[in-house]
Structure formats: C-alpha cells, structure tokens
Image: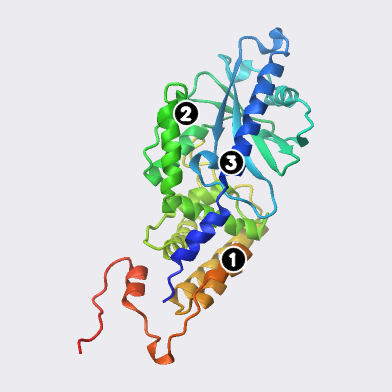
Amino acid sequence: MANLDHLFKKFNQSIKLTDEKRNILMNLRDSLRDRMKINFMQIPYEQRGMMELYFQTQGSIIMDTIINPILEDYDLDDGVYFQGKLKPEERPLPSVFHTWVLNAVDKHNEYEKITDKPTCVRVKYKIGCHIDIPIYYADGYYSPDLAETVKGWTLSNPVEFIAWFEEKAGSGFQKAYLYEALKYKEPYEKWLTDIRKSDCQLRRLVRYMKAWADVKKSEMPCGIIMTILVAENFSLNQSDDVALRDTLVNIKKYLQQNGFRCPRPTSPVGEDLFASTSHKDMEYFKSALDSLIESANNAISSISEVDSCKEWSKHFGSRFPCHLAKVEVTPETNKQPNIESLKRVAGTQQPWCPRKK
C-alpha cells in the first residue's frame, strides 16, 4: 500500500500562505486601519457621539488555515468595532455604519475596487489580494453585534469561533490574547509562532479541504463550513492521506445523520451555514464528496505511489506533487503489502510478520 504522507506534506507547503504574502496582508491591514481612524474622526460628533473604533483580525489567518488560492485573491478579515453603549433600537441602521466604513477607507491608488457586501466592506488591491472588513457594534469585547444590511443586527463573536477551533486543535489558545491584546502581546506572538511551527494535522486537513474546494470553484462550500466540518469530524492518523480519508468518511456520515446541515458552533449557535446553499450546489458538493472518498480509498489501497497520486490529483489538481512519486521497480512476485503499510492504515500494530527461515 502506497504511503503518500510525504507528498501530502509537500502539497501542504505549496498551498499554505507564504510568509511574504502574510506580511503583505499585515502591512496593508495596518495602513488601512490608520486611514480609517483618521477619516472616522471626520464624521460629525452629533452622528458618531462617544463611539470609538478598535480592530480585531479574525478568521483563517489567525488559525493559520489560510491557503494560496490558484486564481482568486488571497485575503484577510479584519473586523472594525464601533464601541458604544447604544441598544440595537437606539443605534443608526447597519447600512449607516457601512457608509461610514466606506467613507473611512477612502480612495487610494493601491485599490482596485471597493465593494459594500451584506456583512462587510471589501477592499480589493491591485496586487492581487483583498481585505474584508466585517462591521460590528460592541458594548465591551464579549457580545458584539454584526451589522448586516439584509438581516439587521446579529449577535456574532469571531473570537469565540477561534477559541472553539483552537480547543479542537489543542493549541493552548486563550481568548485574553485577543480581548486584552496589549496586555498579552508577547504570549500571543509566541503562541502564533508556535502553532505555525508545529502545524498540527487538523490545520493541514482544513487546508487540504480548502484547496480541494479551490479546484472545484464557486459551487463548493466556503472556508468556514470546511473548517467546521473538518474540526467536528477529524480523525487523527500518523499519515495525512489516511487521516484525510477517514475524516472525509466521518463528514459524510455526519451530514447524512443531521440532514446535511452545518450548525455554527458559536454565536449565533446552531445557525445552519448551508441554509442559503441552493439545491444544485448542495447536490454538486455531495457528488464531489462521494467522488473524493472513492478516490481516497483507491489511492490508499494502491500499491503504487504513481497510481495513488493519480487518484488524489483528480481532486487537488496540478499542485499535488505527483512528480515526486516513487516509481516502483519491485518484481511482480514481491507486490504483497508490507507491514508498515498495514500499520499505517489501521493506526495500530498488526500481528502479521514475515515467516522465520
């Protein structure tokens, strides 16, 4: 049985966001924050009152599950929080906050396009990346409301989602790292460095799923759905290919048992993230999932690394490093499975061993 763990690790390195691109995003984020702070103060006091701005980066760049897309922009989510004491019925409409953010980002020669979306303002840059700015109103840190132009004010806490995922990853994340950023700056930076060095299997599997969706394009579930499905159904194994196959099988069972729903684990708890998915797109995802599981089973049971690679590359595309697969020169009579392969698939030692001469 072919062991492709080493090729999956190479694949992971090719899809993981590079340090260079990460630094580009962080620098653009900081410049955008500075610009917004200055421009926000231009809003008349009678409109903004005592509200203050603060920012919190969220999502895959914090959890280090972000990937290099094939064609689309690489991106960062940086929430802007209007901090005040007003109840929802006392605040301006969410659309007003969107207008304030649109005005605050202002025009700049680095921008290609600015788009107002239902939950955020997107700033697309000419260099091939974008920053999404989700807009929140918060009385303190713990219960922010997301300003949705369609649904209105919705309780949503991205820090809680990060904490949920990191508990699954066993990374030692503390919410205080973000809630009290100034106080915990050094421990937070150390935590970020440590998780990027260790790069646990759960993070790698999330990236593999995102890379698969990237190949399949827009009909596939978004990144947060892939993250939840993997984290809820993760199966640890010493080899990434087996771990991915087992996790995929678990995901299929999970979806079949809950009526193909993806409940959000944090506020708003229980929201079905598949609710807005069309029947056509859902059927496409089901078919793609079945096909990937079939190929995964074929790949893992294959004796040849080359043949195994062909199965995986059907779904991961040309970025999967099939050129590094070992070409077997073993005689036909020696094509029985070896003990290490049997151990790898089962995850435990097997009683089988060669006969003594």
The disc labelled 3 sits on which kind of residue?
Arg
Tell me whether the residue at label 1 lies in contact with that at label 3, contact meaning CB atoms closer than 8 angstroms: no
Residue 90 position (above or below residue 72): above
Q: Amino acid at mark 2?
A: Leu
Which mark, residue 231? none
Instruction: Tell me the CA gap for discs 1 and 2.
Output: 37 Å
- Residue 329 in sight from this viewpoint: yes
- Would you say 40 lies left or right of 290 here? right
Q: Which residue is mark 2?
A: 178
229 on left or right of 313: left
- Mark 2–mark 3 distance (CA, rounded to whole Å): 19 Å
The image quadrant of residue 136 is: top right
**At numbered mark 2, what does the secondary structure look like: helix, strand or loop?**
helix
Element class at badge 1: helix
Q: Quadrant of residue 78?
A: top right
Which is more foreground, mark 1 or mark 3? 3
Residue located farthest toward the bottom when viewing the structure as drawn: 333
Gap in Å between the C-alphas at discs 1 and 3?
A: 26 Å
Residue located farthest toward the left when viewing the structure as drawn: 356
Q: Which mark is residue 22?
A: 3
